[in-house]
Amino acid sequence: MKTKLLFPFFLFLFCLLTNAQTTGKYVLVIHGGAGGMDENMPDSLKQEYLSSLNKALEIGEQILANDGTAIDAVEKVINYLEDNPLFNAGKGSVLTSEGKAEMDAAIMSGKDLSCGAVTGVRKIKNPISLARAVMEKSQHVFFAGEGAEKFAKEIGFKFVNPKYFIVENRYETWLKEIKKKKKGTVGAVALDKFGNLAAATSTGGMSMKKPGRVGDVPVIGAGTYANNKTCAVSCTGWGEKFIKNTVAFNVSAMMEYKNMNLRDAVSEMINNRLSPDDGGLIAVDKDGNFTLQYNTKSMLRGYVTSDGKRDVIIWQK
Ligand code: ASP
C-alpha cells in the first residue's frame, strides 16, 4: 500500500524536477576576431572563413542540442578554431616581435562564476583546454608562462613543438592575404538548455607584441566574462582598451546594477566607452537574447539558436 503511494509521488517529483531543469532553449554565438577584413579578398578565402565559422557552429550546436553544457560547447568550439590556421589562436597565432607564439585564453562559467585563464603559453596545443583545467583542477584562476606549462605537465597535458603554431606555406595565396590583415582572435558564448551561461576566448594576442605582453582575453572581466544573473561576453580587438574599460564585466554590471538590456549595455561599451576601430564583442543573456556589435570594419561572427536562427557574417549586413 505504502509503495503504491510512493511510486506516483516520486514520478511526479522526477517530472517536476527534470522539467524545471531544462528549458529546451539554447543559443551559441561565436566570433573569429574584429578588424579590417578586406572586402575584396579572394572569394575562395572568404568562403573558407565562412565555412570555418559554420563548422564551429555545428560543433557547438551538436553539443547544446543534445543536452550538453554551455561550458563544453564553448570549449569544443574554441578547440576547433584553435586548430584552424585561419584564426589568431592556437595554430596560426600571430607572433611576438621575437617571432614566437605566446598565447592567452580564458573560460568562465556563469553558473558559479568559476573561471580559468592562462597567458603566455608557448607549447600548449589548445590553450582554452588548459584554461578549463585551471578552472576545474586547480585552486587558482590564472596561470602565466612557465608556471602555466608546469601545471599543464603535472596534469598530463600534451605538449607540442612551438613551431607547430607557426603556419607554413600550405595556404600560400591565402597566407599572403591573411598576412596583410589583422588576424582574428576567437570567442564563443553560449546559453544551454539548463539556463547556464558560459564564455570562452583564445588568442595569439596582438601581432608584433612585446614578449610577455598580456592582453584582455585572459583577464577575467576585460575580454571574457559570464554570470548567470546577467550574460556571457567574449571580446576581440585592441586588448589594452578592453582592459582599461573592463568591457566584459561592465556589460554585465550595467545589466545587473542599472537594469539595462543586453543590447543597450553592449552598445554603451562599443559606441560610447571604446573608440572607433577598437574592436567588438559577442554576448548572450540569461533569457537567450544575443547581440554581436563592433566598431571596426568587420567582425567574423556567427550564431545559432534552438528556435532556428542561424547565420555567419563578416561585414555589415
Ligand atoms: N584582444 C586581443 C589582444 O589584445 C587581440 C584581438 O582580439 O585581436 O590580445
Image (cartoon, rainbow, N blue to C red):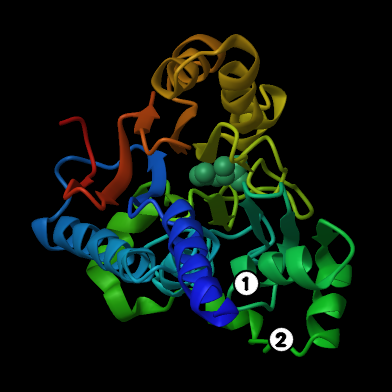
* Left or right: residue 95 compared with residue 136: left
The residues tagged by marks 2 and 1 sit, at their Cα atoms, a distance apart of 9 Å
Task: Kindly tell me whether residue 188 is visible in this rendering.
Answer: no
Q: Amino acid at mark 1?
A: Ser
Question: Ligand 1 is located in which of the four quadrants?
Answer: top right
Badge 2: few (under 14), some or many (20 or more) residues near its Cα, within 10 Å? some
Tag 2 secondary structure = loop
In the depicted structure, whether residue 206 falls above or below residue 87? above
Q: Position of residue 182 (x, y in %)?
A: 42, 46
Q: Residue 211: which quarter of the image?
A: bottom right
Residue to which mark 1 is pinned: 129
In the image, what residue occupies the spot 47% across and 20% down? Answer: 270
Q: Residue 40: which quarter of the image?
A: top left
Q: Amino acid at mark 2?
A: Phe
Q: Position of residue 251 (x, y in %)?
A: 57, 24
* Left or right: residue 113 compared with residue 87: right
Check the picture and name the quadrant holding the C terminus.
top left
Q: Position of residue 231 (x, y in %)?
A: 53, 35
Q: Are marks 2 and 1 in contact (CB under 8 Å)?
A: yes
Tag 1 secondary structure = helix
* Left or right: residue 149 compared with residue 34: right
Task: Kindly tell me whether residue 127 is visible in this rendering.
Answer: yes
Badge 1: few (under 14), some or many (20 or more) residues near its Cα, within 10 Å? many
In the image, what residue occupies the spot 33% across and 50% down? Answer: 25
Q: Position of residue 115 (x, y in %)?
A: 72, 54
In the depicted structure, whether residue 1 falls above or below residue 109? below
Residue to which mark 2 is pinned: 157
Ligand 1 closer than 8 Å to label 2 CB: no
